[in-house]
Amino acid sequence: MLYFLDIFGTLIFAISGAFKASRRELDILGALVLATATGVGGGIIRDMVLGATPPAAFHDESYLFVCLAGGVTVIFIAPRIARRWNMVMAADALGLGVFSAIGAAKAAAYGLGPMGTIMMAALTAVGGGVIRDVLVCEVPAVIRTDFYATAAILGGATFVALHACGVGQSWLLFATTITATGLRLLAMRFHLRLPKVRRLDESAIPNERD
């Protein structure tokens, strides 16, 4: 079950990566690179941190084929997708939830504690998006005001809480996915944002020579 969820999440994120390439008017190779980086980036980071080497994306070619399929699909139907942007964002929210669940489950399988499990949920969910944004010279959305990484963190916390109560794996995956996805969708619907750090008045900063 974890494998099929991983493939599904990879496809969703690959599509979002290719669409970002379309909006930035990259060429075909750029779109495929961005789709692949977004689709498997989070999983590679997770596996490297956990010591599960080589990462699944390197020894199972299905991940690469899924990313390429997602990229090619967007290349040919990007204008149609653009008219249904809300559906794309909803699918991205679902991918966030799926990867949060997979990251938490794999962390638990490797014996990580509660904080480590939550961190793995977040890293798996947002890692690909961070790589995508860096490649197109954007400040990653997860460190701005977007309620994205927060949803993944709370999804991981849900996994930890239910796992401590002895809930079975299928229900753990379901609950984590629903929590992270639901929070992200609510944030999109009601424009929820984390508060920004207050900007300092430069005149209030002491001069190093003083």
Image: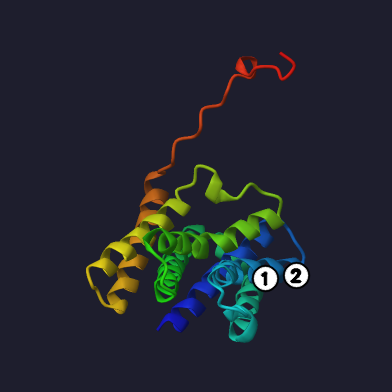
Category of crowding for the residue at label 2, using alpha-carbon neighbours closer than 10 angstroms: few (below 14), some (14–19), many (at least 20): some
Image mark for residue 75: 1
Of pointers 2 and 1, the one earlier in the residue sequence: 2
33 relative position to 83: left or right:
right
Instruction: Tell me the quarter of the picture where residue 116 sits.
Output: bottom left
Task: Judge whether residue 93 can be spotted in this image.
Answer: no
Q: Residue at x 64, y 81 (%)?
A: 58
Against 109, residue 17 (above or below) is above
The single residue placed furthest to the left in the displayed view is 165
Q: Residue at x 55, y 46 (%)?
A: 143
Which amino acid is tagged 1? Ile
Against 143, residue 26 (above or below) is below
Looking at the picture, tell me which residue is in the foreground, 93 or 25. 93
Residue 43: percent from left, percent from top: 55, 71
Q: Secondary structure at mark 2?
A: helix
Which amino acid is tagged 2? Ile
Name the image quarter holding the C terminus. top right
- Dot 2 corresponds to which residue? 28
Residue 120: percent from left, percent from top: 47, 64
Category of crowding for the residue at label 1, using alpha-carbon neighbours closer than 10 angstroms: few (below 14), some (14–19), many (at least 20): some
Q: Secondary structure at mark 1?
A: helix
Name the image quarter holding the N terminus. bottom left
Q: Residue at x 47, y 53 (%)?
A: 149
Task: Judge whether residue 2 can be spotted in this image.
Answer: yes
Residue 199: percent from left, percent from top: 56, 26
Instruction: Tell me the quarter of the picture where residue 205 sits.
Output: top right
Residues at circles 2 and 1 in contact by the CB criterion of under 8 Å: yes
Q: Residue at x 64, y 19 (%)?
A: 202
Q: CA distance from mark 2 to mark 1?
A: 7 Å
Residue 113: percent from left, percent from top: 39, 64
105 relative position to 89: left or right:
left
Looking at the picture, tell me which residue is in the foreground, 46 or 61. 46
